[in-house]
Amino acid sequence: GENVEQHPSTLSVQEGDSAVIKCTYSDSASNYFPWYKQELGKRPQLIIDIRSNVGEKKDQRIAVTLNKTAKHFSLHITETQPEDSAVYFCAASNGPSGGQNFVFGPGTRLSVLP
Amino acid sequence: DTGVSQDPRHKITKRGQNVTFRCDPISEHNRLYWYRQTLGQGPEFLTYFQNEAQLEKSRLLSDRFSAERPKGSFSTLEIQRTEQGDSAMYLCASSLLALGSQETQYFGPGTRLLVL
């Protein structure tokens, strides 16, 4: 089955700096890669996602890049703000089959220092 | 607010008791997922439904766990004879599986279970 690893487990950056979180996956059939943000005590919220037919997607300060050959994808946050502090989870899925094929990484705790 | 609701939000129970959680998905969503999340970990898949059919269960799901979605709308997750190791956040997510589109899961606020 799919295995998703995520690095780093914790990340501290100064406000205004960029943050990068990287995930690797094992199943070459995976074709959908969402990123979720979870603030303390709250539900995971989808912030951006990418499908395997594109290599990069951007939404304001957030971007995701995908390297299918190397089986890794990364989340990039520019001009970080204190409200970006949260735990970020990546996930990989091989499409509509869902279920166990929707696998989450262990998370990265991002702290943006003022 | 994503529209997925869960009840209760918190549950404290004694070891050996049974507990039941409810999830109400976004109304037009045909898929519903249950996950378990422990501190410092990502959501871990338990089971999922497409409409009223339970299509898949995790190997991690013991016989003490059962889930239903009788009318293809809300779902319940029951844990029988709870153990301290069952203490976790139980998350529900829903999605719309439609031809030609990628399903996106939207999470509920979770039910935090503490087994004493």
Image (cartoon, coloured by chain):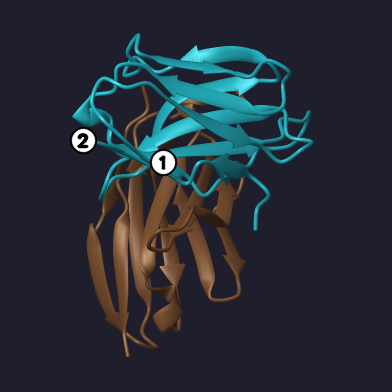
Chain colours: A brown, B cyan
Which image quadrant is residue B106 in? top right
Q: Nearer the viewer, residue B76 or A4?
A: B76
Q: Which mark is residue B48?
A: none
- The three-letter code of the residue at mark 1 reads Thr
* As drawn, A58 above or below B104: below
Is residue A52 visible in this depiction of the protein?
A: no
* Residue B50 percent across, percent down from the top left: 66, 20
Q: Residue at x 37, y 73 (%)?
A: A85
* As drawn, B63 above or below B109: above
- Which chain is home to disc 2? B
Left or right, A5 with reference to B4: left
Q: Residues within 10 Å of mark 1 (few under 14, many from 20)?
A: few
* Residue A96 percent across, percent down from the top left: 62, 26
Calculate the distance from the C-alpha at mark 1 to the C-alpha at mark 2. 48 Å
* Residue A99 percent across, percent down from the top left: 51, 24
* Residue B29 percent across, percent down from the top left: 73, 34
Quadrant of the image containing the C terminus of chain B:
top left
Which image quadrant is residue B15 in? top left
In front: label 1 or label 2: 2
Which image quadrant is residue B86 in? top left
- The three-letter code of the residue at mark 2 reads Leu
Contact, mark 1 vs mark 2 (Cβ under 8 Å):
no
Q: Nearer the viewer, residue A7 or B97?
A: B97
Q: Nearer the viewer, residue B93 or A74?
A: B93
Q: Residues within 10 Å of mark 2 (few under 14, many from 20)?
A: few
Q: Residue at x 65, y 53 (%)?
A: B2
Secondary structure under badge 2? loop
Secondary structure under badge 1? loop
Residue corresponding to mark 2: B116
Residue corresponding to mark 1: A69
